[in-house]
Image (cartoon, grey):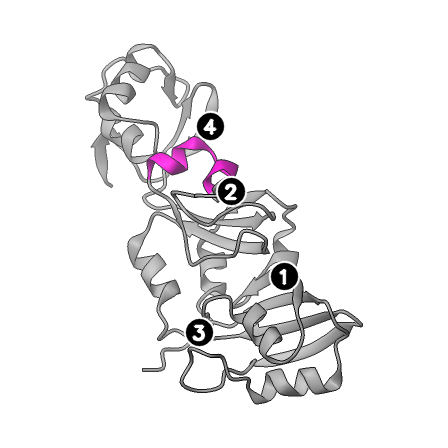
Amino acid sequence: MAKITLDRMLQSQGFGSRKWCRELVADGEVSIGGETPTDYKQAVETDGLVFTVFGEDWTYREHVYIVLNKPAGYECSRKPSNHPGVLTLLPEQFTWREVQPVGRLDHDTTGLLLLSDDGAFIHAQSSPRRHVPKRYVATTHEPVTDALVAQLLGGVQLHDEPAPLHAVSCQRLGEHQIEIVLEQGKYHQVKRMLAAAGNHCDALRRIAIGGLTLDALALDEGEWLYLEAADLTLLAGGTDKG
């Protein structure tokens, strides 16, 4: 089993600098198994470790994988410029351990957003070589027609793309609502494709990545949860096409 000193463990979990974590121990704010350690140099086993800080229970996680139901009005950036950042919706510990969004949703786009502090995971999920389907529901300004669906499936040409981009699947949900599944993950892709097809996107919500769906997670807007191993498996629906 992996062992680490108490102050290093607390720092790795986002509870502040090493000095601050040592002060937490000295002030009796940390407990493990109902006991309050006094020596920050005490070695603790991290496998399955549950500890308490300020009376709140935490489970040791080497990396965190998080899903957030993003509300409108938040930027997917660690250094937002015009709106609050999505990290303000999460516990402060995640900022300390440098959690960041996996890809981006526009500030006015809502729905399923992944976040992590695992660089390899972020790279794998963001790689253009991995064709992971992402499902969106768009509210359109003009009515959704059969011709619009056909255009999106057949491919529309965007100004800065060498070839037309097409939806993996597309279906009309209502007079002004359409579901679109994409694999490419280009900048503002849904909005730009709808505009190129002669319509306009008034609202956009991402409802699934791979096999991970917002409905199954049952998260209200602004709520988050940890992704466990089974959830991460659902994200592995993409294929490498290089």
Mark 3 = which residue? 238
For the residue carrying disc 1, how many other residues have a C-alpha within 10 Å: few (<14), some (14-19), or many (20+)?
many
Q: Are marks 4 and 1 in contact (CB under 8 Å)?
A: no
Q: Are marks 2 and 1 in contact (CB under 8 Å)?
A: no
**Residue drawn at the location 74% of the way across and 85% of the way down:** 146
For the residue carrying disc 3, how many other residues have a C-alpha within 10 Å: few (<14), some (14-19), or many (20+)?
some
Q: Secondary structure at mark 2?
A: loop
What residue type is disc 2 on? His
Numbered tag placed on residue 57 in the rendering: 4
**Residue drawn at the location 39% of the way across and 44% of the way down:** 78
Q: In the image, is residue 139 above or below residue 168?
A: above
Mark 1 = which residue? 204
Q: Secondary structure at mark 4?
A: strand
- Residue 198: x and y in percent read 65, 79
Q: Is residue 95 magenta?
A: yes
Q: Is residue 192 magenta?
A: no
CA gap, disc 3 to disc 1? Answer: 22 Å
Q: Secondary structure at mark 1?
A: strand
Mark 2 or mark 4, earlier in chain: 4
**Residue drawn at the location 65% of the way across and 46% of the way down:** 220
